[in-house]
């Protein structure tokens, strides 16, 4: 199985900050990397598919990059509604696997 | 509106069984692979199983293989997860999710899960 390693596991940031979360796959997954946002008590929400494709309705302050084994989720200017936990997921091969999550907290 | 609604969770003793259901609406259910993903209390996301749109292809996580069975009734727009021989470590919130961008009929590779239900809680305890 492909292992997904996210870092950091948590971070504290202020509104307006630029935030970067990284995800590393244990082997090449081409661009089959997805990012989810999960708020407390809610289901995950797909933000970015295939490394960089923003889902409809997702604010443009979110962006994704990378290919192969190293990927990045960037929030260009953190907003109050962005405080949540973010997960990466590889969908290159079954079983699909998720990273451990990054909790973004208010500084 | 695209919607998924899970049901069937509850409290069950170790070794017991449950069947989860996921009712879909607002999209052409039979055209999409569907998946189950679970989240243990305070933990991250764990993929459980996937079934192709036709129902002809299924995959399972090693942790549930041989105990869980995924199925679907496309005439009823409903996905199921039959869970047998339940263990304490199966305690979790179970989500069903619509899978997008499948490669091939078996959906071995895809573009993520773009619609999720609200989840149904399964607690395995004596």
Image: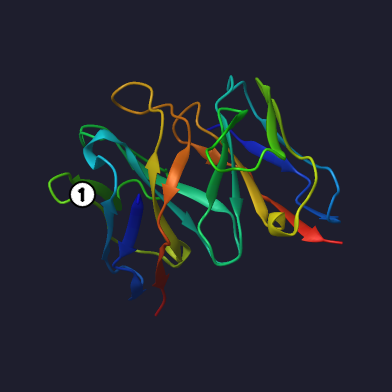
Q: Which residue is mark 1?
A: B77
Q: Position of residue B98 (x, y in %)?
A: 37, 43
At x 41%, y 56%, the residue is B95
User: Disc 1 sits on a residue from what chain?
Assistant: B
Quadrant location of the C terminus of chain A? bottom right
Q: Position of residue B24 (x, y in %)?
A: 28, 52
User: In the figure, is residue B55 to the left or right of A83?
Assistant: left
What colouring style does the render use? rainbow
Q: Is residue B83 in view?
A: no
As drawn, B102 above or below B60: above
Q: Is residue B37 in view?
A: yes
As drawn, A63 above or below B83: above
Q: Position of residue B87 (x, y in %)?
A: 40, 64
Q: How many other residues sit within 10 Å of disc 1, few (<14), some (14-19) or many (≥20)? A: some
Total labels: the figure holds 1
Residue A83: name its quadrant.
bottom right
In what element is the residue under mark 1? loop
Asked whether A57 or B6 is in front, the reply is A57
Q: Position of residue B123 (x, y in %)?
A: 41, 72
Looking at the image, the residue that sits furthest to the left is: B75
At x 62%, y 46%, the residue is A87
User: In the figure, is residue B11 to the left or right of B53?
Assistant: right
User: In the figure, is residue A64 to the left or right of A29?
Assistant: right
Asked whether B76 or B121 is in front, the reply is B76
At x 33%, y 60%, the residue is B5
At x 56%, y 27%, the residue is A50
Asked whether A50 or A1 is in front, the reply is A50
């Amino acid at each position: 199985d492909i292992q997904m390693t996210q870092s950091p596991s948590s971070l504290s940031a202020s509104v307006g900050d630029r935030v970067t979360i990284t995800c590393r796959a244990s082997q090449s997954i081409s661009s089959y990397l997805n990012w989810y946002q999960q708020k407390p008590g809610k289901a995950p929400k797909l933000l970015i598919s295939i490394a960089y494709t923003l889902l409809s309705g997702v604010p443009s302050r979110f962006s994704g990059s990378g290919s192969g084994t190293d990927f990045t989720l960037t929030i260009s200017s953190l907003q109050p509604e962005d405080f949540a936990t973010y997960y990466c997921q590889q969908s290159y091969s079954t079983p699909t696997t998720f990273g451990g999550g990054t909790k973004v907290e208010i500084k | 509106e695209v919607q998924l609604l899970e049901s069937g969770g509850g409290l069950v003793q170790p070794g017991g069984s449950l069947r989860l259901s996921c009712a879909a609406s607002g999209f052409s259910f039979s055209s999409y692979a569907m998946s189950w993903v679970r989240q243990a209390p305070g933990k991250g996301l764990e993929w459980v199983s996937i079934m192709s749109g036709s129902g002809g292809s299924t995959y399972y996580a090693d942790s549930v293989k041989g105990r869980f069975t995924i199925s679907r009734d496309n005439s009823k727009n409903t996905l199921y997860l039959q869970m047998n021989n339940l263990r304490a470590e199966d305690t979790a919130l179970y989500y069903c999710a619509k899978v997008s961008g499948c490669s091939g009929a078996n959906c071995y590779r895809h573009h993520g899960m773009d619609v999720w239900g609200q989840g149904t809680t399964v607690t395995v305890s004596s």
